[in-house]
Every structure is written in C-alpha cells, then in structure tokens.
Image (spheres, helix red, strand yellow):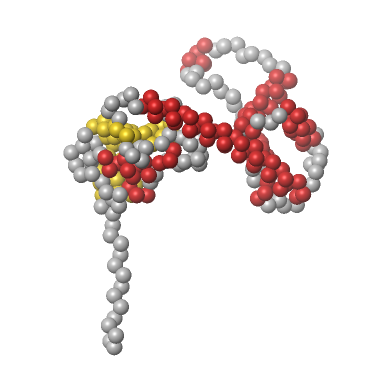
Amino acid sequence: MKLKSALTFSLLALGTATAIQAQEVKLNIPGQPAAAAAAAAPVAQVFTEAQLVETFGWFMGKRIGLSELAFSPAEVESLLKGMGAAVSGKESPYELEKIGPAMDEFMKKKQDAYMGKLKQEGLKQSGDFFTKLKEIKAVVELPSGLRYEIVKQGDGAVPKPTETVKVHYTGTLIDGTVFDSSVQRNEPAEFQLDQVIPGWTEGLQKVKKGGKIKLYVPPSLAYGDDARGNIPPSSTLIFEIDLLDIKSSAPAPALPVAPAAGK
C-alpha cells in the first residue's frame, strides 16, 4: 500500500526515527573538551533501563519537535497510545489511506499555529530592537526601513544594482546567532546585486569598493514571514559586509539580425 504526499508532514516522525536507527545515538554534553574529559576519567554513572528508555523517548520527541506543536494532555495520551501500538508491532488503528488527509490537515493546523506564534515573536523582537537602535547615532535610517552603519569608508566606486559584487560577509540574528558566513567558509561570495534580498540591494549601494558596512535588515526587506533554514519567520537580519570588488555584469547577447527582404 502506497501513500501519496498527503502524509509528508505527519510522517516526519517516521523519517526521524529511521534516521536515528541508521546512526549511533550519542547525547554528548557540549562545551566539554575531549582531552580534559579523558584526563579526568570520571566514574561512569549507572542508569536503569527505565531511565535510558525515558531519555530515548525524550530524545525522539525533541528531534521530531513535538513541543513546538503544543499538544494537549489528552492529545499526548493519544500519541503515546499510538506509539505503544507501533512498539508492540500492531497495525495502524485506522486505515492510513483514509485517515491520512484528515491527519495531515490536523498537523498542518498545529504547524501553522506554531509558525504564527513565531511570526508574532519575531515582529515584537524586531520592533524592540529597532527602538534601541535609534540610540546609536552612527546608524542611518532609510525611508524603506533599512538601517546601515559605515564601519570603514572605501575609496572605490559604488556598485550598481546590475553589477556583481564580491564580498565577505557574516549574517546574524538579533540575538547574535550566526546563520551564514563567507568568512567562516574562508571564501568570498559573489552576487549580482539585484538578485539578492532587497536589504542587500539597497544597502550595498551606500558603501564604496574597499569599504565595510553593517546592515540592519527588517523582515520586510529580508525573508518576510517565511522561515529560511535556521532563520525564523519575521526575523530582522544583521550583516557585516566587506565590499571587496565590483564586476560589471556580462552584456546580454545581441539578437541575430534578420536578412533584408529580397536577399
């Protein structure tokens, strides 16, 4: 029996569990140097099987993102009942082809509610951030809502929207989380200026080649209500950008000239 894409979101748990089976589960504590841990040689704590299974259940729930879906106590009870049936090797309590669309719709509502919550949180955080940013005199606010700060004056040309820029950049959320960085990759990036987010297109026209600029990009000039990778919806983005070079875009190829009539 094959199911179509209606169960894509609902079967996320199955995909995650399969991925867990394919690799060794390690719950390492971050921030502890391996060498120091080995030198200390602490006595291993002994856990009961019940504690191990409970922690594995927590691990699976965390990986799947169950807390984000705000299940009620009654829904959690039903969830555990279904998991218990699966663990016991029983068949699905209901025919998947029939219940699939309704289950998908139910889970979509849960996901939409969570995304809506993230959007509201993002908008509030952005508003608070830009209110505090007004206290920094070096930051310039543009009519579009973009804010920028010249970190280093360049001495070259200013890029045009149709030109390609070569840059080193680091992008962070307002809490300092780095979501992208050519600096960390140790490889400059090249973009045609009118092919990136509006905040970049407008902001990089405020700095000269050889200069460095800091952009404070509101959601409306970034990804709006959409989530991108580890960027939550309605996020304000901060970029530190070194403008290394400006390259003219290649001209469009000329159209062939039609032969004159009668030739």
Residue 11, compared with residue 56, is above or below; it is: below
Query: Is 133 on the left or on the right of 85, as rendered?
Result: left
Query: Is 185 on the left or on the right of 244, as rendered?
Result: right
Q: Quadrant of residue 249?
A: bottom left
For the point 73% across and 20% down, which residue is it? 50
- Nearest the viewer among 184 and 203 is 203
Looking at the picture, how far across and down is residue 68, in whole percent? 61, 31
Query: Is 98 on the left or on the right of 253, as rendered?
Result: right
For the point 35% across and 37% down, which residue is it? 146
For the point 23% across and 44% down, which residue is it? 158
Q: Quadrant of residue 168?
A: top left
Q: Is residue 31 visible?
A: yes
- Nearest the viewer among 209 and 46 is 209
Residue 250, compared with residue 130, is above or below; it is: below
Residue 128, compared with residue 222, is above or below; it is: above
Q: How many marks?
A: 0
Farthest residue, direction bottom: 262
